[in-house]
Amino acid sequence: MHRQVRIAPSILAADFARLGEEVRAVTKAGADLIHVDVMDGHFVPNITVGPGLVKALRPHSAKPFDVHLMIEPVDPFISAFADAGADIITVHVEACPHLEVTLQLVKAMGKKVGVSINPGTPATTIAPVIGCIDLVLVMSVNPGFGGQSFMDAQLEKIRQFRNMIDDSGRKIDLEVDGGINCDTAPQAIAAGADILVAGTAAFDGGQNFYAKNILQLRSGTSVA
Ligand code: DX5
Ligand code: ZN
């Protein structure tokens, strides 16, 4: 089955001093979604941005905002990210003691809901909620920082989710995040991914290269 691969540049790798311009540039360059990494210094060992930034960036792109919440607790912040303009809100299975409750909070805000899973967590932890989510986000690095190396061992988990999603008969996006570049993108696509998050590889070289970077990642091949 041919799947249309979509690219979600992570603004974590953009120039933070001019983020609005960066979001406009990457949108113009062909980004399918804008990936926003939210880190709290507690669930992950880094601190990034909050709902205020999502709201400030919202007018700079018409593409869906794909908000990846690496925070714990998460429930008290969902309405703020929804109101700020997130289209997809993804939470970590490891950060949600009452996962179904959290998923319902997102849905009640009228947003698409995703569940993300760390490299050390087995795919089976998401199986109980596969019937009520819109997206699975497989981490191919331990979350916290951009620029890490893709963990090959996660390819098997991507394949497991591909099968689980196909068996469900539901329309669920399978997104992969961490260490995606021209070498690893084809592997993730072959394993079944349909959305690739890319920070370093998408923003490499500055704004003149964003279109080429995105095209290369999407096609899974090297473009001269
Ligand atoms: C990792 C983040 C990723 C990361 C991707 O904690 O969730 O979105 O920024 O960056 P690269 O593509 O550089 O691995
Ligand atoms: Zn992310």
Image (spheres, rainbow, N blue to C red):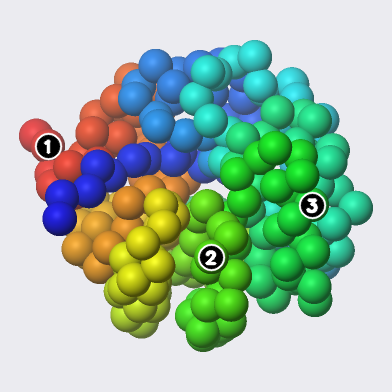
| Eye-nearest disc, 1 or 2 | 2
* Residue plotted at (47% across, 45% down): 199
Please report contact status of discs 1 and 2: CB closer than 8 Å, yes or no. Answer: no
138 on left or right of 56: left
Q: Is residue 136 visible?
A: yes
Residue underneath mark 2: 131
Q: Is residue 23 above or below residue 133?
A: above
Residue underneath mark 3: 105
Please report contact status of discs 1 and 3: CB closer than 8 Å, yes or no. Answer: no
Residue 89 lies, in percent from the top left, at: 65, 47
Q: Is residue 131 above or below residue 64?
A: below
149 on left or right of 98: left
Relative to the observer, which residue lies in front, 116 or 70? 116
| Helix, strand or loop at mark 1 | loop
Q: Earlier in the sequence, mark 1 or mark 2?
A: 2
> Which quadrant of the view contains residue 12?
top right
Q: Is residue 192 above or below residue 82?
A: below
* Separation (CA) of disc 1 from disc 2: 38 Å
* Residue plotted at (53% across, 18% down): 62
Residue 148 lies, in percent from the top left, at: 47, 63
| Eye-nearest disc, 3 or 2 | 2
| Helix, strand or loop at mark 2 | helix
* Residue plotted at (73% across, 67% down): 100
